[in-house]
Amino acid sequence: MADYYDLLGVSRDADSETLKRAYRRMARQYHPDVNKDPGAEDKFKEIGRAYGVLSDPQTRSRYDQFGEAGLGGGGGMPDMGDMGGFADLFETFFSGFGGGGASQGGGGGPRRRGPRQGDDLRFDLTISFSEAIAGQEKEVQVRHLETCTTCKGSGAKAGSGPTTCGTCSGAGQVRRATRTPFGSFTQVAACPTCEGTGEVIADPCNACGGQGLQQVRKKLRINIPAGVDSGTRLRVSNEGNAGQRGGPAGDLYVFLTVQSHPQLRRDGITIHSEVAVNYLQAILGDKIEVETVDGPQALDLPAGTQPGAVLNLTGKGVPKLGNPVARGNHLINIKVQVPTKLNDLERNLLEELAGHHSAKGHKHPHKSGLFGGLFGG
C-alpha cells in the first residue's frame, strides 16, 4: 500500500488546506470522466481514500502512528458515490429495498455539531525482565490529539462560528440516483462537505485548520505493577485523543513486551533455572550461589544430590498480578558435570576409591567401573 502522503504529493506536516488543494488537483486529474487512461480509476480511488483518512484528525493520528494497520479497515473516500458501480449497488442492498423498484437508503439523520468522544490509542512498551517482576514507574512520550488552545476546540477563528453547509443546506445528507441492472435506486449518504453535521466552518482557525484539535507530544508516567508479562495491557484513562466539541477524551492502552533473561525462564508465576555443579559437589554437598529474581542467593546443595534433581526456592518466584504478596516458586534443575579428562593424581585417587568400593562388594575393580564405585557403593 502506497504512503498516503506520497499519493497526495504533500509532506507529513501538511495542514488541512494543503491537503484539500492537493486532493482536488489530483482528483480532477484522475477522475474517470476526464482521464480514460488504464489505471486512472484505481488511482482516483486511492487518492480519495488517502484524503478521506488524512482529512480527519483522528484517523490521521492513527495512520501516523500505525500506518494502514491502525485504520482497522476504516477510512475511505470522502464521497463514496464517486466510486460508482458495485459500491453504489452494495450500498443500496444494505440500505434495503422499497416498492416500485426504488429505494431510499436509511443513512440516518444529520449528526450535527454535538460532542464526539476521542479515539483510544495504543502504545507498545518494552520493559526488562526485572522490571516486569518487581514493577516500575516508566516515563514515556506519546503523540495524541489535544484540544486546540487557540480556538478552544471550536475550529473557528475568534469572533466567528459554524455556518449552514451549502452542499446539503444543513440536512447533513445528500442523495444520488444510481442505475443498476435491478432498476434505479436512490442512495442516501452523509454529506461529504460537512461530514453529516449540517454545518461548516467558514473561517477556520489557523492553528488547527478548523479541526479544533492539534497533535502534540506529551510525557506520561506509566505505573507498571509487579508481575506483568508480555501481552499485558494497561489502561490509562483520558490519555487518548481529545474529544471534539467538548466530547470526552479516549483512553491510552499500553501493551507490554517483556525481554527475556539470560538465566531465568518464566512460566506463569513460576521461575525455572539450571545450575551446573561438579560431581564432587553433588556427592559431598556444598553451599552454592544461584541467580534469582531478587538477585544472587546462597543455596545449600544436599550431599548425594542426583543429576536432574530439582530444588525448590519457595516464594521466590513471580508476584501474582494484583496481589504482589502472593508469589510463585523458583525451581532449580541440577546439572552434574563429569570431567572428561583427569590428571594422574586424580585418576589414582579415583581408582583407589573405586577399588575400595568394589572390594566391599567383592567385585573386581576394573569390572565394577568408576561410576559404579562412586554412586553405587
Image (cartoon, rainbow, N blue to C red):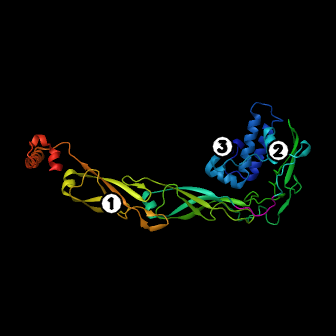
N-term-proximal mark, 3 vs 2: 3
Frontmost of labels 3 and 2 is: 2
Q: CA distance from mark 3 to mark 2?
A: 31 Å
Q: Which circle marks residue 92 in the picture? A: 2
On the image, the x and y values in percent for residue 270 come to: 40, 58
**Of helix, strand and loop, which one carries label 2?**
helix
Q: Considering only vertical position in the picture, is 172 above or below 176? A: below
User: Do the CB atoms of the residues marked 2 and 1 lie less than 8 Å apart?
Assistant: no
Number of residues whose C-alpha sits closer than 10 Å to that of mark 2, classed few (under 14), some (14–19) or many (20 or more):
many
User: Do the CB atoms of the residues marked 1 and 3 lie less than 8 Å apart?
Assistant: no
N-term-proximal mark, 1 vs 3: 3
Lateral position of residue 232 relative to residue 209, left or right: left
Looking at the rendered image, the quarter that the N terminus falls into is top right
Residue type at mark 1: give it.
Asn
Q: CA distance from mark 2 to mark 1?
A: 67 Å
Residue pointed to by mark 1: 312
Residue type at mark 2: give it.
Thr
**Of helix, strand and loop, which one carries label 1?**
strand
Q: Which circle marks residue 3 in the picture? A: 3
Q: Is residue 201 among the parts visible in the rendering?
A: no
Residue type at mark 3: give it.
Asp
List the single residue furthest toward the front. 362
N-term-proximal mark, 2 vs 1: 2
